Image (cartoon, grey):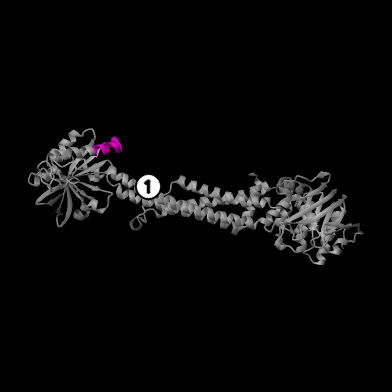
């Protein structure tokens, strides 16, 4: 599903250049639930941003579902993101003046899906994450766990190939974290490829594979016996 | 671009962000409102100006004799020059090509009375064409005519306020007023836009006045109206020739600055027009300044709006919004708000000007303030365009920011 070859990325910091990723080779098969771990500064978020086409790579190649991701202009990146990827963020990033349902319909709006179909589809995904009754509520009326579940529904509604989650439990307490991870494991069980960036050991243990980054290189990549979240 | 979904999206954004909407709308509405009101007041000032200076007909020349200041052809200096009936006839024959009407004006004042009321009024001995020179408007009765002059009738035409003074509520027409030991028949009442003093004047046939003044044929000054079709150039030429002819006829040194004055509305008009255009420049300057302030205001707010939405725009990009759709959404919203509030401001301003109307005429010299509808519309469109432009730059920048940067900060 994801093929990465000799990936390099550096950032210019004034006159210095900061070499963040120093040759990453990394493949992900369909249906995997991968945890990318590392301390801050290890390059894990940069890797996720490049995977998510939120950032550009300097050197190397990146194939997603057989499509080479290169020469991205903003419009092309937007279309690929919309088609291939679903994002879940640590801070949820819901649009605060839109209801849960409207937030979930937004990716479909940018796909040009008709309003009625959009609403029906989004409602189905809200039901899947157990929030059908909360469809008309604003994010400010939801708890942290509920917000993250809305965000997950929004990430899934466009039927992406890969779900990318950046510290999805970072802003949640441990009980809610477990609930959200259980949801993610459920989604994975239905065949979705999922990558999670985290620095929490217990979260990583709930994944089927753990990749550890340190100073811009992969230091460990092992299969993991997935622990059920709940 | 103008799909129903886009509109719904925009209506929702507007509804859910009332403060933001209010701020940008209010700025534009206020900008246009102030522009319209100031511009309208400027025009009102100009109207007052026009009214003051354009009371008399524009194709008019005044010929006024005075004392000479230089000796000439055996005559001493300080000689008194007089115009008489002879000159009147000569000039109307000689300059027939230019002249539309010619009338003497013998000015003096006298006490006139009716029953118990009496008062001192300026009296003018004039001919029939004086009516069009002064743009005298008859309210009732008629002005003096040729027969009055020929028969030296003791008929008078009185100003509106003279009638009010002397006759109170009575109708003055056909009544007799007394003056100089004689009685005069009131044949007409006039009004004049030149102000109260212009409506306290009494007109009598110049021939009658000459007869009463012991058979003199002095005509005081002369008022000539020339044919409008000769234009400004023709008027200047006519004035020159007339001056030359009269100076020759009256033996006045051609280099004497005194002796004879000719004032022409054509040259006055030019000066007045210059003053009016200065006024117009000031008005335009104030208008452009106001508009500029409005543009700066709406630009600031657009920058603020886009800044405030950076994170939301980043989210939208992360879930598949193209830069084009981001810019389009912001512009669409900005143009929609500024258009609605711009026209609101425009109509509020026009309504205000209509409400003011002539209320400020007495104390502030603002008469009938107005704004051309097209000027108002243009100003509104300019403000909308600049609002959109001011929104475009930050929107473009926001749309090109990597979503990851927009989403940072937590």
Q: Position of residue B78 (x, y in %)?
A: 13, 48
Q: Is residue A185 above or below residue B215?
A: below
| Figure quadrant of residue A167 | bottom right
Judging depth in this view, the residue of A195 and A147 nearest the camera is A195
Query: Is B262 left, or right, of B52 in this rendering?
Result: left
Q: Position of residue B304 (x, y in %)?
A: 60, 57
- Quick check: can you spot residue B142? no
Q: Residue at x 64, y 58 (%)?
A: B308
Crowding at mark 1 (Cα within 10 Å: few <14, some 14-19, many 20+): few
Q: Position of residue B290 (x, y in %)?
A: 47, 54
- Chain ID at mark 1: B
- Asked whether A56 or B36 is in front, the reply is A56
Q: Is residue B194 left or right of residue A134?
A: left
Foreground of the two, B231 or A121 = B231
- Which residue is farthest front? A15
Dot 1: what SS? helix
The image shows residue A95 at horizontal and vertical percentages of 70, 57
Q: Residue at x 90, y 59 (%)?
A: A226
Picture quarter with the N terminus of chain B: top right
Identify the image quadrant of the C terminus of chain B.
bottom right
Write down the region rendered in magenta: B227-239
Q: Mark 1 highlights which residue?
A: B277
For residue B228, above or below residue A136: above
Residue A61 visible in the shown view:
yes
Please say whether residue B320 is one of the residues in the magenta stretch.
no
* Residue B229 highlighted magenta (yes or no): yes
């Amino acid at each position: 599903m994801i093929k990465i070859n000799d990936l390099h990325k550096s950032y210019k910091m004034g006159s210095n250049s900061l070499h963040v990723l120093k040759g990453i080779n990394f493949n992900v098969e369909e249906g995997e639930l991968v945890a990318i771990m590392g301390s801050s500064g290890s390059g894990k978020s940069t890797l996720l941003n490049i995977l998510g086409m939120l950032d550009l790579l300097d050197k190397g190649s990146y194939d997603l579902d057989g499509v080479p991701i290169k020469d991205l202009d903003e419009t092309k990146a937007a279309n690929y993101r919309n088609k291939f990827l679903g994002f879940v963020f640590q801070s949820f990033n819901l649009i605060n003046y839109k209801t849960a349902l409207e937030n979930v319909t937004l990716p479909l709006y940018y796909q040009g899906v008709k309003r009625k179909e959009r609403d029906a589809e989004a409602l189905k995904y809200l039901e899947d994450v157990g929030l059908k009754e909360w469809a008309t509520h604003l994010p400010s009326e939801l708890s942290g766990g509920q917000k993250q579940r809305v965000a997950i529904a929004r990430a899934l509604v466009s039927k992406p190939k890969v779900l990318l989650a950046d510290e999805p439990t970072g802003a949640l307490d441990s009980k809610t974290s477990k609930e959200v991870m259980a949801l993610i494991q459920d989604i994975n069980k239905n065949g979705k490829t999922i990558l999670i960036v985290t620095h929490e050991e217990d979260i990583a243990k709930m994944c089927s594979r753990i990749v550890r980054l340190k100073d811009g290189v992969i230091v460990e990549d092992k299969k993991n016996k997935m622990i059920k979240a709940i | 671009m103008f799909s129903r979904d886009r509109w719904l999206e925009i209506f929702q954004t507007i509804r859910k962000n009332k403060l933001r909407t209010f701020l940008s709308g209010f700025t534009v509405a206020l900008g246009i409102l102030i522009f319209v009101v100031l511009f309208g007041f400027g025009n009102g000032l100009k109207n007052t100006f026009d009214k003051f200076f354009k009371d008399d007909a524009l194709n008019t020349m005044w010929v006024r004799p005075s004392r000479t200041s230089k000796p000439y052809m055996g005559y001493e200096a300080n000689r008194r020059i007089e115009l008489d009936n002879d000159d009147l006839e000569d000039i109307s024959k000689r300059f027939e090509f230019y002249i539309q009407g010619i009338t003497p004006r013998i000015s003096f004042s006298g006490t006139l009375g009716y029953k118990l009321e009496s008062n001192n009024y300026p009296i003018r001995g004039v001919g029939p064409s004086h009516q069009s020179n002064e743009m005298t408007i008859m309210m009732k009765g008629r002005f003096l005519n040729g027969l009055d002059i020929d028969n030296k009738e003791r008929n008078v035409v009185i100003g509106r306020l003279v009638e009010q003074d002397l006759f109170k509520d009575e109708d003055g027409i056909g009544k007799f007023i007394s003056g100089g030991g004689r009685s005069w028949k009131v044949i007409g009442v006039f009004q004049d836009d030149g102000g109260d003093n212009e409506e306290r004047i009494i007109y009598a046939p110049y021939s009658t006045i000459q007869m009463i003044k012991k058979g003199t044929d002095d005509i005081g000054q002369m008022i000539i109206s020339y044919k409008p079709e000769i234009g400004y150039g023709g008027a200047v030429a006519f004035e020159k020739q007339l001056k030359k002819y009269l100076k020759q006829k009256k033996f006045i040194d051609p280099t004497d600055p005194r002796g004879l004055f000719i004032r022409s509305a054509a040259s006055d008009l030019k000066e007045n027009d210059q003053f009016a255009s200065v006024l117009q420049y000031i008005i335009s300057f104030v208008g452009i300044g106001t508009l500029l302030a409005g543009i700066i205001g709406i630009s600031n707010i657009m920058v603020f709006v886009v800044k405030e939405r950076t994170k939301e725009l980043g989210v939208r990009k992360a879930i598949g919004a193209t830069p084009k759709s981001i810019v389009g959404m912001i512009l669409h919203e900005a143009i929609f708000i500024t258009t609605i509030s711009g026209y609101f401001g425009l109509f509020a301003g026009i309504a205000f000007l209509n409400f003011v109307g002539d209320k400020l005429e007495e104390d502030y010299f603002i008469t009938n303030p107005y704004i051309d509808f097209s000027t108002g519309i243009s100003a509104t469109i300019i403000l909308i365009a600049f609002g959109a432009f001011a929104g475009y730059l930050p929107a473009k920048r926001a749309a090109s920011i990597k979503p990851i940067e927009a989403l940072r900060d937590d």
